[in-house]
Amino acid sequence: MDAALLTDLLAAAVRIATPLLLAALGGILSERSGTFAVAIEGMMLAGAFGAAVAAMAAGAPAGPLAGPLAGPLAGLLASAAAGMLVASLVAVATTRFSTDQMVTGLAVNILVAGLTSYLLRALAGGRTPVVRFPVLAPWPVPFLHDIPVLGPVLFGQPPLTYLAVVLAVALGLVLARSRAGLLVRAAGENPQAVFATGTDPVRVRVWSILACGALAGLGGAALSLQQVGSFTDGMTHGRGFIALAALIVGRWAPVPVALACLVFGLVSALALRAQGWGLPVSSYVMQMMPYALALVALAGIGRAARLPAAIGTPFRRE
Amino acid sequence: MSGRLRGEAAGALLAGLGAVFLALAVGAGLILATGRDPAAAYLALFGGALGSPDRIAFAFNKATPYVLTAVGVALCFRAKVINIGGEGQIALGGLAAAWVALSVPLPAGALVPACLAAGAAAGALWAGLAALIRLWRGVHEVLCTLLLNFIALLLVAEALKGDLGETGAGFPQSPLLPAGAWLPRLTGTMHLGIGLAAVAAVLGSVYLWRTTFGFRLRLVGASRAAAVYAGVSPARTLVSVMLIAGGLAGLAGGIEVLGVHRRLIEGFSNGLGFTAIGIALLAGASPLAALPAGLLFGLLEAGALAMQRQVGVPSSLVPIIQGLTMVFVLCALGLRARRGGA
């Protein structure tokens, strides 16, 4: 394999991993604080939709905020807000009503799929509408970008990829080193202990779910605004669940989770290129690879994956 | 059934109805917000579903895979197993049924039962695989069944690209199945499936409440520790309930292929399995109640197209109502558990 081919493949892997990583980082916060993050699929889809609508509206030449950055910025804000909106529903249901977290996540995913499809038709009209907008341009880092192979792969990416990497490192530090991180982890391991120190663990969980929504929403923006340049029905297509698998494979720690996302990105990038390279494998079989890999990785980790002790159980004062 | 149980069943029914009405009300708000008349939309919806015998037949056909799959999901819920693999189990059931219909030479009378049996077997196999991964490797069943869904859908696509596909068709689909493999129709458009679904709902209920297996299932669901203490193996219960649920979903897939499309079409299973989870929830995890709950969701979907055509309200209102119904039922369940539990 020559260098150009390798560069292209690795750069694509990083690009494809970006939405997964942002969603998985949100999932880490939610699950470490005690709430299963099954709804990140819906949060991503809502984020992708919010980003698409806002980018289209604000970026229009005659728009109220016309300018080269207005569309993307509005898109990012809207994606985080849309993700948080979905998250607030999850938070209310799981904390105020003590609902089953897994099934609530699934219900919310169905709801968001319907809602985005409904609103898309209300806004754009037609039977199978698509909204299109320009994708975020890469921001090559001066000098570093000129390193062969690694330069374009790591320093020639669009902005949300850098953001995801920074957030992964930051989240790792916050979880391990700060009081807030300790509270998040304790709310997921032993909420009674949090309560005993005078903090309401339910509050910690609600804020973690909301932050998860914002991050997964940004993940959706990374998909629609940075990777694809359009919004279509159900466009996340299970990426939230792949992120969920990466979360478990990376054992709820940001840096290993980021590596897991990269592996999934690499497999997807390979699947996309297999046809072009004339590999004797059907494109459908290649498309199965990320899901099969997730399954195999989860089965490989097996029982070694220790969930936060109090995940899935609503907090009750004793 | 004791008085307390009956009270519980009535409570579940009331909660379900309340959830549906609340979801319809929120839907009405949404219709209003997008500048349409909710009353007209809902009139068109229910008129479209119930307006003529043909439309009712269409709704019954829609409800068939829902009821079958939801009976299995409800049984799983009883054992505290969240099986969300209906989607993939339906897809592979349809694939197996179509393969038998197109490749196995059988006399006309034996073909339909053989196809349906193959469908059920394929669905059971796929669900069994998820159960084994759960047991051996401790991967949560939500994740295994979910990931297996995507693989199953791509397997169908792959089969349609290969030998099973119709050459020259613009769309990934199989050739029309031989007439001997078509599911008999009860009326002009209504096929036999709804009858099978009703039988499955009744049998599922009998299984749950009147057999030793059903008792073990409920015991494992109520308390694993008590089940183990009583000598009931949670592992064996998990595998058997998943096989049953997968078999029912696979049967549903076979019925879709033989009864509705009369060929295998890519994406024929899309959304069916997920909706069935909502139906099982709405039914309060009662196999018998899955019949009316499935019919209700079938009616909603059958009417949605008429609503879209006549009033211009997108048919994606239906998944919104379904998702909201699920959330509201879950809230009611959570509140009840909190009051009863602590």
Image (cartoon, coloured by chain):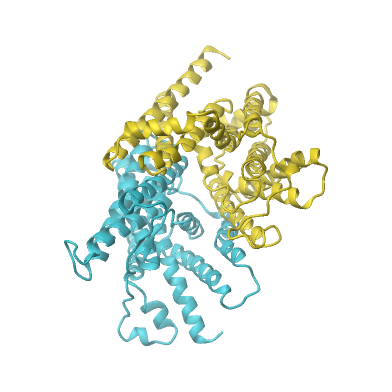
Q: Which residue lies furthest to the top in this view?
A: B3
Q: Height in image: B233 above or below A206?
A: above
- Residue at image location 58% in from the left, 48% down from the top: B268
* The quadrant where residue A169 appears: bottom left
Percent x, y of residue B12: 47, 24
Q: Which residue lies furthest to the left in this view?
A: A64
Q: Quadrant of the N terminus of chain A?
A: bottom right
Judged left or right of residue B236, residue B274 is: left
- Residue at image location 23% in from the left, 69% down from the top: A69
Residue B231 appearing in the image? yes
**Chain the render paints cyan:** A
Percent x, y of residue B54: 55, 32
Q: Height in image: A244 above or below B308?
A: below
Identify the hue of chain B.
Answer: yellow
- Residue at image location 38% in from the left, 44% down from the top: B314
Front one among B295 and B214: B295
Front one among B311 and B327: B311
- Residue at image location 63% in from the left, 40% down from the top: B252
* The quadrant where residue A174 appears: bottom left
Q: In which quarter of the image is the C terminus of chain A?
A: top left
Q: Height in image: B207 above or below A188?
A: above
Residue A178 appearing in the image? no
